């Protein structure tokens, strides 16, 4: 069982001063996470999504973090692969360099990005991207393994060239894919790579997604393998605020989740701009999340769009992940029972104060992680 943090660099105040503050706070949080036993820090990649995610250059953030840490895994969750955004040769060069300088700590996730807002920034139609992404996904691990490229594909054409450097991990770092819809879980499993389930899916939904992924991985064919290092691994997102005061944790955590859900709905579904209502109780915040969920269901029904967890998971309330360390242990156990290999904790949501995130990291590091480490040791001894 791995315990990690994933960052969007989400914020309410988008001033230059606050942007700088948020990034420096994320570094402080990550350094504390290494001290108290977390395994990895992951960074998303998004462009032009104001408030929702200002993590637009994860390669720079992760390189900076790698230089300040000695043990933390350094995770791209994920690199977006439209060629004009991240050309496969440059991705291979950056991943290899980061892997060398971090001492072989890189985890390499791949994806396409989720909005036309992002795709259009680089001149693409989101609906036409997937074949390009798949071409890059197969090409980059080959470059990392061979140190050479010659490729005449439909979307990417590269003359014969040596590519340097090669990564420290051989043949390349472990590979992952961002997964929200069921068909992406099938693709990840059939491709023999890890699945990063980046939605607020509860344990029951994670169990369903785990079953889909494991079956696809189990039945994969050699010719579909992406890269040269099969990785069977499912990571589940878990938004959490863990304090000694359960009521305070629920109020703050649900406020952050509501901002997250509203900000993603703004960019992904054309909803209203997100809000922060600090005076509302946890019950009020939960009720508003439920109303927002009803609005999404009504909209999808009117548009005759099949309703899936990818549309509704952001409104799923992780009851025990907003609470005390004991509450968090109980919820993480449910995710473990559902099949998760890694918990991707999400703390840094809009409106959640830095000091609350630091306390959450300490509580998980001092209570939650040791609980499961001891449990794992007991299982190994048995």
Image: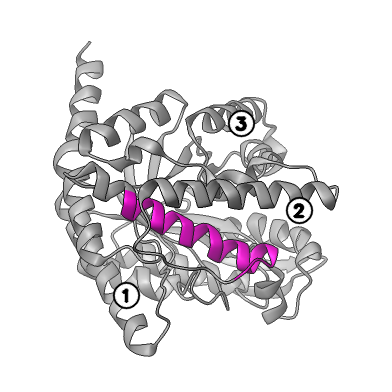
Quarter holding residue 63? bottom left
Are the two marked residues, 1 and 2, in contact with CB atoms closer than 8 angstroms?
no
Foreground of the two, 137 or 11 = 11
Q: Measuring 14% from the left and 54% from the top, which residue is drawn there?
A: 35
Left or right: 31 with respect to 98? left
Foreground of the two, 349 or 271 = 271
Q: Quadrant of the N terminus?
A: top left
The residue pinned by badge 1 equals 22
The residue pinned by badge 2 equals 299
Q: Measuring 56% from the left and 32% from the top, which residue is drawn there?
A: 205
Q: Which residues are magenta?
A: 251-272
The residue pinned by badge 3 equals 217
Answer whether residue 253 is magenta in the image.
yes
Q: Mark 3 vs mark 2: which is more N-terminal?
A: 3
**Local crowd at mark 2 within 10 Å, few (<14), some, or many (≥20)?**
some
What is the x, y in percent for residue 126? 75, 66
Asked whether residue 145 is in view, the answer is no
**Local crowd at mark 3 within 10 Å, few (<14), some, or many (≥20)?**
many
Asked whether residue 322 is in view, the answer is yes
Q: Measuring 63% from the left and 29% from the top, which residue is drawn there?
A: 212
Q: Which callout, 3 or 2, points to the residue nearer the camera?
A: 2
What is the x, y in percent for residue 342? 39, 39
């Amino acid at each position: 069982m791995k315990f990690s943090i994933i960052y969007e660099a989400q914020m309410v105040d988008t001033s230059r001063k606050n942007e700088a503050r948020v990034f420096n706070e994320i570094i402080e949080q990550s350094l504390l996470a290494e001290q108290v036993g977390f395994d990895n820090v992951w960074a998303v990649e998004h462009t032009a999504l104001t408030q929702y995610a200002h993590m637009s250059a994860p390669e720079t953030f992760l390189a900076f973090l790698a230089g300040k840490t000695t043990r933390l895994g350094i995770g791209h969750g994920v690199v977006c692969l439209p060629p004009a955004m991240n050309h496969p040769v440059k991705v291979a060069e950056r991943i290899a360099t980061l892997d060398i300088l971090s001492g072989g700590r890189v985890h390499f996730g791949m994806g396409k990005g989720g909005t036309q807002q992002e795709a259009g920034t680089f001149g693409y139609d989101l609906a036409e991207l997937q074949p390009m992404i798949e071409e890059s996904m197969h090409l980059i691990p080959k470059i990392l393994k061979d140190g050479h490229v010659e490729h005449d594909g439909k979307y990417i054409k590269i003359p014969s060239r040596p590519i340097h450097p090669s990564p420290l991990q051989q043949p390349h770092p472990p590979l992952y894919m961002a997964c929200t819809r069921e068909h992406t879980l099938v693709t990840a499993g059939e491709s023999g790579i890890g699945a990063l389930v980046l939605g607020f899916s509860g344990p029951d939904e994670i169990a369903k997604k785990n079953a889909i992924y494991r079956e696809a991985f189990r039945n994969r064919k050699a010719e579909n393998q992406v890269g040269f290092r099969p990785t069977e691994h499912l990571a589940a997102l878990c938004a959490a605020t863990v304090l000694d005061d359960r009521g305070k944790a629920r109020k703050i955590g649900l406020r952050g989740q509501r901002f997250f859900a509203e900000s993603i709905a703004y960019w992904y579904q054309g909803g209203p701009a997100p809000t922060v209502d600090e005076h509302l109780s946890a019950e009020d915040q939960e009720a508003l999340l439920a109303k927002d969920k009803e609005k999404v269901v009504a909209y999808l029904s009117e548009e005759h769009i099949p309703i899936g967890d990818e549309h509704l998971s952001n409104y799923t309330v992780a009851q025990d992940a907003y609470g005390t360390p004991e509450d968090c242990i109980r919820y993480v156990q449910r995710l473990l029972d559902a099949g998760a290999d890694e918990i991707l904790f999400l703390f840094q949501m809009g409106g959640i104060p830095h000091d609350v995130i630091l306390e959450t990291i300490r509580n998980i590091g001092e209570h939650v992680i040791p609980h499961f480490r001891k449990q794992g040791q007991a299982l190994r001894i048995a």
